[in-house]
Image (cartoon, rainbow, N blue to C red):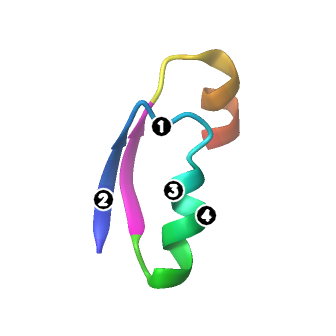
């Protein structure tokens, strides 16, 4: 399953849902530190 993430932060959802086979389609974040983590 694919999902979109708005106000992603450091995207803890990817860590939780990854083992279940879920994949992020895209992320949306404006803060510099979370953006650096998501790259």
Label 4: how many Cα within 10 Å (few below 14, some 14–19, many 20+): few
Secondary structure of residue under mark 3: helix
Q: Is residue 5 above or below residue 35?
A: below
Alpha carbon separation for disc pair 2 and 4: 13 Å
Q: Quadrant of residue 23?
A: bottom left
Q: Is residue 18 above or below residue 3?
A: below
- In the displayed image of the protein, which residue is found farthest to the bottom? 20
The answer to the question of whether label 4 and label 3 lie on touching residues, with beta carbons closer than 8 A, is: yes
Query: Residue 13's mark?
Result: 3
Which residue is at a point 69% across and 31% down the rendered structure image?
A: 36
Alpha carbon separation for disc pair 4 and 1: 12 Å
Which residue is at a point 49% across and 18% down the rendered structure image?
A: 30
Q: Earlier in the sequence, mark 3 or mark 1?
A: 1
Query: Residue 8's mark?
Result: 1
Query: Which residue has dot 2 on it?
Result: 3
Secondary structure of residue under mark 4: helix
Q: Quadrant of residue 39?
A: top right
Question: How many marks on residues?
Answer: 4
Q: Earlier in the sequence, mark 4 or mark 1?
A: 1
Inspect the magenta stretch and tell me whether residue 22 lies in it.
no
Q: Earlier in the sequence, mark 2 or mark 1?
A: 2
The answer to the question of whether label 3 and label 2 lie on touching residues, with beta carbons closer than 8 A, is: yes
Q: Is residue 14 left or right of residue 21?
A: right
Residue 4 placement (x, y as % from top left): 31, 50
Write down the region rendered in magenta: 23-28
């Amino acid at each position: 399953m694919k999902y979109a993430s708005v106000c992603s932060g450091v995207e803890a959802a990817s860590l939780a849902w990854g083992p279940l086979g879920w994949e992020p389609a895209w992320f949306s974040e404006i803060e510099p530190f979370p953006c650096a983590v998501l790259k």
